[in-house]
Image: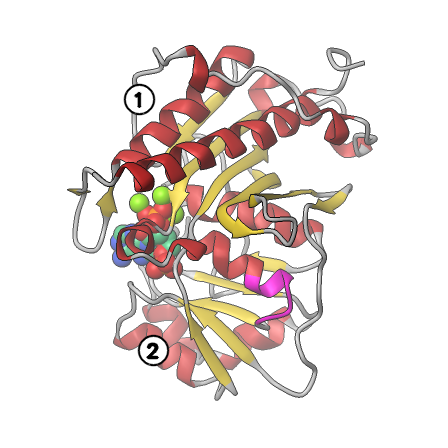
Amino acid sequence: MTTNAPLIMRIMALSINTAKRAGVIIRDVLKQGDLGIVDKGKNDPQTEADRSAQRCIIASLAKKFPSIKIIGEEGGSDLNVCDEWLVGELDETFLKQDCPADWRDAKPEDFVIWVDPLDGTAEYTQGFVEHVTVLIGIAIKNSAVGGIIHQPFYQQSSGELGRTIWGLKGLGTGGFTAVKPPANEFIITTTRSHSNALHQKAVDVFNASKVLKVGGAGFKVLQLLEGKAHAYVFATPGCKKWDTCAPEAVLEASGGTLTNINGEHYEYHENVEHVNGRGVLASVGNNHQELVEKIPLEVRQAVGTKQT
Ligand SMILES: Nc1ncnc2c1ncn2[C@@H]1O[C@H](COP(=O)(O)O)[C@@H](OP(=O)(O)O)[C@H]1O
Ligand SMILES: [Mg+2]
Ligand SMILES: [Mg+2]
Ligand SMILES: [Mg+2]
């Protein structure tokens, strides 16, 4: 059964277990105390947790799926990892589900896996650990189709630490309960560490009843899915394909929408520019285009320079 399942189902099932393993590494690095922070650029830190979690994820996926293209935020990693970091077991509960017909025949060359081993690194280093997620996004023929969002520091009511959310277009989502945001309010979720004047102008036009400033693309999309916010607005370049691939797939598998601020979907093929040049607009209602049009055209045109 396991070995006969379509490729997308096996990739999703291994990604679920690999994201959980990466979550353990992220908790362990914090516990041990030395984060090993390196600055990759302005407001762009990398820690030992980012590096180690990426090695664990990419080594595990590459071993099982050697012909599939995998792109990770932290660049080329040493894939010679200890056995403890090599995850080979697939999530059997996920595999029991039927593969949507659209993806059943997808071939290895149709896939690109986008890995953000630790989304919300700035927040991780500052102690806002609940904003941290592990993101594994699966693209088929340019589109974000499947995604895993793992929260290493989520406290379950059972006492267990961590939870894993998945979404596959055509199948649905798992690992959480979707909640609609309040009908009589308009709440925006946005960056807490990468704002600028133009971005602020776009947020202001919505005249929102509340603006939540939190870290990470994964955590912001979870806020939409859990009814804490109506829209995710990021009107500046800066986040990358590995930030949006998994969140886009999970959100859209649940009926929401994630695009650039002009309402266009990003592409996720292996040669695409990594930066999401025209920002991010995500929403859970059925008024995505109305939200796009609320942002004045001159603001939208000023964000970024390239269509990616
Ligand atoms: N100006 C910028 N420079 C570098 N990274 C940026 C950025 N703007 C956004 N990002 C990245 O996009 C993700 C979400 O950002 P934010 O929390 O500000 O919304 C973070 O991912 P990582 O934490 O994985 O690096 C962050 O680093
Ligand atoms: Mg980073
Ligand atoms: Mg990220
Ligand atoms: Mg990251």
Q: Is residue 70 above or below residue 148?
A: above
| Mark 1 lies on residue | 77
Q: What element carries label 1?
A: loop
Residue 170 image offset from top left, x and y in percent: 77, 42
Q: Residue 306 sits in which quadrant?
A: bottom left
Display colour scheme: secondary structure
Q: In this view, does 152 lie above or below 263?
A: above
Q: Which amino acid does label 1 sit on?
A: Ser
Mark 1 residue crowding within 10 angstroms, few (<14) / some (14–19) / many (20+):
some
Q: Residue 140 in magenta? A: no
Which badge, 2 or 1, is on the more N-terminal residue? 1
Mark 2 residue crowding within 10 angstroms, few (<14) / some (14–19) / many (20+):
some
The reply, left or right, for residue 154 in relation to residue 180 is left
- The nearer-to-camera label among 2 and 1 is 1
* Tag shown at residue 62: none
Is residue 237 at least partly visible in the picture? no
Counting every numbered tag in the picture gives 2
How far is the residue under mark 2 from the one under mark 1? 36 Å
Look at the image and give the residue range highlighted in magenta: 223-228
| Mark 2 lies on residue | 200
